[in-house]
Amino acid sequence: MSDPYIDRSQTGYVFTSSNTAISWLSVKQIMRATSWNHTEILAIHEVVAKLSNVYPEDMEAPAGGVDDMTKLSYLHEPGVLQNLRTRYELNEIYTYTGNILIAINPFQKLPHLYDKHMMEEYKGAPFGELSPHVFAVADVSYRAMIKEGKSNSILVSGESGAGKTETTKMLMRYLAYLGGRKATEGRTVEQQVLEV
């Protein structure tokens, strides 16, 4: 026979709303089986958001995210961050926002993204036809330089540890690959550029 005076508890969530805010409470409910059937609710954690700061979820976004964030139904900070997170979890570290490439440092080596096969894939491919990649940006810049006969620039920016140096190395490697294979002193153009 069970003891009727032993406490039982359960954890759950309570949702409250008003005209100006939404609150989520992570709660622990303690139920004491006494003759009075006493119940206590202890709030463990509360999250409050102003309604003006709550954004709609993009129900049309695919489970794997979108490769160009201009395709998102709602282009707001939470939607952008969720899309980047979803793609990052799938090892898709590159995402476009129009003609801007966003790269997230994977903090691991992904050599299959930068091998000769990938360089061949992106060589001459129309921008946006293939998955987002640093080679696509370099290819567009190189083709514009050749076609227009003018210098081009690629801006690489980010916080410390974001992967700017590695990204720049990959850009230079790809541009050297496109620029020719003429060897001097037994070294290819690509090897010479990467040594600088």
Image: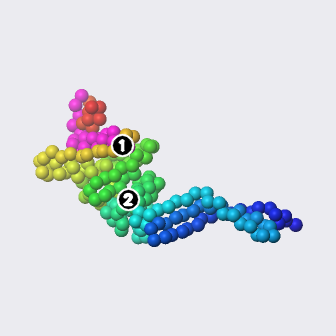
Name which residue type carries label 1: Glu
Q: 125 or 48, which is in the foreground?
A: 48
* Image point (19%, 51%), residue name: 143
Earlier in the chain: of badge 2 and badge 1, it is 2
Q: Position of residue 86 (x, y in %)?
A: 45, 58
Does the stretch in magenta take in 73? no
Residue with the mark numbered 2: 77
* Boundaries of the magenta span: 162-185
Q: Is residue 185 visible?
A: yes
Q: Is residue 191 visible?
A: no
Q: 15 or 37, which is in the foreground?
A: 37
* Image point (23%, 52%), residue name: 140
Q: Is residue 184 above or below residue 13?
A: above
Q: Position of residue 45 (x, y in %)?
A: 58, 57
Q: Position of residue 5 (x, y in %)?
A: 81, 63
- Image quadrant in which the N terminus is located: bottom right
Residue with the mark numbered 1: 159
**Quick check: marks 2 and 1 in contact, CB under 8 Å?**
no
- Image quadrant in which the C terminus is located: top left
The quadrant holding residue 181 is top left
Q: Main secondary structure of the magenta part?
A: helix
Label drawn at residue 4:
none
The quadrant holding residue 38 is bottom right
Q: Is residue 40 left or right of residue 176?
A: right
Does the stretch in magenta take in 171? yes
